Image: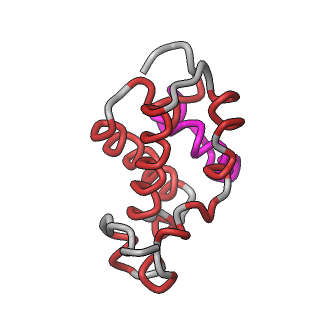
Amino acid sequence: MGADCPELERFVRGEVDAAHFPHREHVRMAFEMLRRHDFAETVLHYSRALRAMAARAGKPQAFHQTITIAFLSLISERVESRPVADFTAFARDNPDLLDKSAVARCYHPQRLASELARRTFLLPDPGR
């Protein structure tokens, strides 16, 4: 992971409390991880860390595979297409990703709320 981002190290080791992990931190950890790993590796490590965090908080059902991978995909595309020096610049250039509903705009509400979407990644709805 790299010592230049101790928060990422703590996230991966499972030392971050879910109560102190708002959406902006989800995006920041994804950004930092994607700068260090390719997309497939990031999906594995990020999902594992997030799933463990939800379980430690006593809310394993809070982990949502589709939302997680869809956000990682959006963040990855932005990181690769418009490289920036740090997360501050990334957040400034991509304020839409700091909105939790950014992924929801790509899915019908019922599809995203389904148990299937929680368990496995569903592609976005065509035409949305």
Residue that sits furthest to the front in the current view: 127
Where is residue 91, by image quadrant?
top right
Relative to residue 69, is residue 6 depicted above or below?
A: above
Q: Quadrant of the N terminus?
A: top left
Residue at 53% of width from left, 29% of height from top?
A: 8
Q: Which residues make up the magenta segment? A: 9-30
Residue at 33% of width from left, 77% of height from top?
A: 116
Q: Position of residue 69 (x, y in %)?
A: 39, 54
Q: In this view, does 43 lie to the left or right of 84?
A: left
Residues 104 and 54: in front is: 104
Residue at 58% of width from left, 46% of height from top?
A: 26
Residue at 43% of width from left, 57% of height from top?
A: 70
Q: Position of residue 43 (x, y in %)?
A: 34, 45
Where is residue 88, by image quadrant?
top right
Q: Position of residue 22 (x, y in %)?
A: 68, 50
Residues 31 and 9: in front is: 31
Q: Where is residue 128 in the image (x, y as percent from the top left)?
A: 46, 73
Q: In this view, does 59 lie to the left or right of 44?
A: right
In the image, residue 61 lies in the stretch drawn in magenta? no
Relative to residue 109, is residue 69 depicted above or below?
A: above
In the image, residue 27 lies in the stretch drawn in magenta? yes
